[in-house]
Image (cartoon, rainbow, N blue to C red):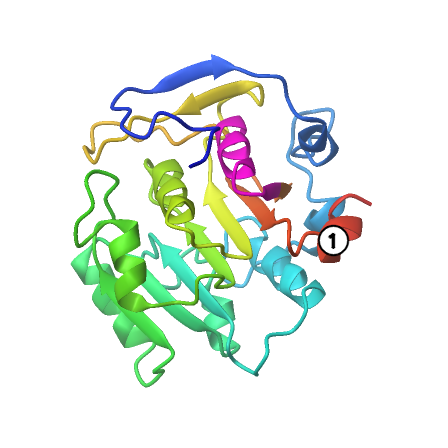
Amino acid sequence: KNKATDSMANENATVRQRRVPTRRQLIRRRLSKDGVFCMEGGLLRYAENVTSQDGEDGIIRRIFELLPPPPAPNTRCCVDIGAWDGRHLSNTYSLLLSGWRGILVEADGVRCRAISELHSGNSNVVAVNAKVTCGPEGACHITSLLETSAPPVDFDLLNVDVDGIDYWIVHDALAAAYRPKLLVVEFNPTMPNDLVYIPPRSDEDVQRHGASLAALVEMVAGWDYCLVECTMFNAFFLHRSVLPYVLDVAVP
């Protein structure tokens, strides 16, 4: 059990302040004097968009260039929760074009069919029409979806962008002993870095306030993940088992 998050059945939001970790200060989102987001320093030097929004494609590509190669060609695997149509603002589309295996989960039926059409003929890509839940385990709970799609326990990338319960999806995947090498998780950039905001554990659509960055940092640290970069909306966490391969680049 992750001691950092004892509110597993919490139906109310958790809000508190915490001291910003030193590592967060080292790789904080770069802001120029006029407050404009700057794509420079750390892994942001490799920011590039194929279909991503804020350079995530290039950052992900560079991270996996630095990590040891997989045991066999074309065996990298990503799980994308909230995949939209598979291309629009996607952090995984370019990976799938390069031979990755992909499990793309999308709640909207029309968009999920678009994913299937986009990757028709590619047996490495599976489109799953499901609204991932964070309540009691069922067919659409993240653990059930992972068990059904059967990625390796230490698959390469978990990308989560569902505009709300991203925190709980990641929490439950890690609690079920999945250990992706890289987590890319959307956070709420309107919240200050010293604020811990954990959204309610609820599948209701009435709230769309994603977790604060500090809440995600605190939660995933309990499973040995470390923040290595941020874009405007996404945080990148590496498992400590592979962190040394990227550390010098992430914090020059």
Name the quadrant of the C terminus: top right
**Percent coordinates x, y for residue 193 in the rendering:** 58, 23
Q: Rate crowding at label 1 as few (under 14), some (14 to 19) or many (20 or more) other CA atoms within 10 Å.
A: some
> Residue 39 lies in what quarter of the image?
top right
What's the residue at 36%, 74% (across, down)?
A: 125
* Percent of width and height locating residue 211: 42, 30
- In the image, residue 104 sits, relative to residue 204, either above or below, namely below
Q: Nearer the viewer, residue 235 or 10?
A: 10
247 vs 4: above or below: below
Task: Please state the extent of the stretch shown in magenta in the rendering.
Answer: 213-226
> Which residue lies most toward the right here?
252
- Please state, as top left, top right, bottom left or bottom right, where the N terminus lies in the image: top left
**Which residue sits furthest top?**
16
Q: Is residue 219 magenta?
A: yes
**Which residue has dot 1 on it?**
244
Classified by dominant secondary structure, the portion drawn in magenta counts as helix
The picture places residue 132, in percent across and down from the top left corner, at 25, 48
Give the amino acid at mark 1.
Answer: Pro
Q: Secondary structure at mark 1?
A: helix
Q: Residue furthest bottom?
A: 121
Q: Is residue 230 visible?
A: no
